């Protein structure tokens, strides 16, 4: 599988997920649809699928235009408030994008219908990818707009935390530097956090993304994954 990061708005990330075998593609949270169309043309792929993590405008607000620009798209989401929704999903639902398998992970808290999408390829040595929207960020987690701390704990520890350690984490925003500053405040003696913060500052200063991380890494520097 191939994942292209498409920056949008101030600090959002859309992700173009490509099955290189079939040249079929999905887009995660296409808030800037014209940019998505440019990307699918550049790669010569056929966009069939929209994966919406949650209904907030900076994630689902481009769905209506996206389906006008590329007719026939299937728009997945876990909430009736998702714009242009055609297929409402629940926890553990699976479907295909080309030869890739997408599994839906219900992670309510930031919103009551938040879904993360785990993507794997059968008989492949490449690590899985998980698109976490505003549930899990690099070194942080989303605000509890519609849920509780208990729900976020379950989402981070019992759902996402049980994925294979090498799973690549693709989150919805570039919040890494600020998240790591908070993590350093929580654990001032954690050398992993200090090194990751220095690395993230350099990446951002060079105009480069700090995404992805991995599930294993998050357990080393994300204070919300390190709670006991």
Image: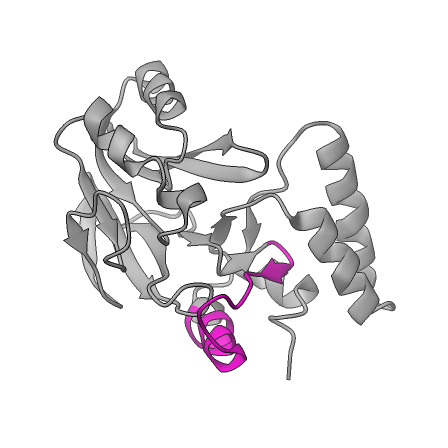
Q: Report the span colored magenta.
A: 138-159
Picture coordinates of residue 217, whole percent (x, y): 62, 59
Quadrant of the image containing the N terminus: top left
Answer with left or right where residue 89 lies relative to residue 215: left
Answer with left or right where residue 68 lies relative to residue 184: left
Question: Can the viewer see residue 21 in this picture?
Answer: no
Residue drawn 48% across the image and 61% down it: 135
Rendering quarter of residue 113 = bottom left
Residues 220 and 86: in front is 86
Quadrant of the image containing the C terminus: bottom right
Picture coordinates of residue 176, whole percent (x, y): 67, 49
Instruction: Decide: is 130 above or below 4.
Output: below
Picture coordinates of residue 26, whole percent (x, y): 28, 37
Please, which residue is most extreme toward the bottom here? 228
Residue drawn 27% across the image and 58% down it: 103
Residues 60 and 156: in front is 60
Render colour scheme: one colour
- Label tally: 0
Residue drawn 75% across the image and 63% down it: 183
Residues 145 and 102: in front is 145
Please, which residue is most extreme toward the left here? 72
Question: Can the viewer see residue 12 in this picture?
Answer: yes
Q: Is residue 15 magenta?
A: no
Instruction: Decide: is 118 above or below 18.
Output: below
Answer with left or right where residue 31 lies relative to residue 189: left
Q: Is residue 158 magenta?
A: yes
Residue drawn 68% across the image and 65% down it: 220
Instruction: Decide: is 208 above or below 196.
Output: above
Please, which residue is most extreme toward the right here? 189
Rendering quarter of residue 72 = top left
């Amino acid at each position: 599988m191939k994942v292209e990061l498409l920056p949008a708005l101030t600090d959002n990330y859309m992700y173009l997920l490509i099955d290189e075998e079939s040249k079929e593609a999905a887009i995660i949270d296409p808030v800037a649809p014209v940019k998505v169309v440019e990307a699918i043309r550049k790669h010569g792929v056929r966009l069939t699928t929209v994966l919406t993590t949650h209904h907030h405008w900076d994630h689902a607000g481009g769905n209506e235009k996206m389906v006008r620009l590329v007719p026939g798209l299937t728009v997945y989401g876990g909430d009736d408030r998702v714009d242009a929704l055609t297929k409402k999903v629940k926890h553990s639902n699976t479907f295909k994008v080309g030869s890739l398998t997408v599994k839906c992970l219900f992670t309510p808290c930031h919103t009551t219908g938040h879904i993360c999408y785990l993507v794997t390829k059968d008989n492949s040595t490449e690590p899985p990818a998980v698109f976490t929207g505003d549930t899990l960020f690099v070194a942080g987690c989303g605000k509890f707009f519609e849920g509780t701390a208990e729900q976020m704990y379950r989402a981070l520890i019992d759902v996402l935390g049980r994925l294979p350690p090498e799973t690549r984490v693709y989150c919805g925003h570039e919040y890494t530097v600020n998240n790591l500053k908070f993590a350093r405040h929580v654990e001032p003696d954690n050398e992993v956090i200090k090194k990751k913060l220095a690395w993230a500052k350099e990446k951002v200063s060079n105009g480069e993304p700090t995404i992805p991380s991995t599930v294993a890494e998050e357990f080393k520097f994300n204070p919300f994954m390190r709670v006991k």
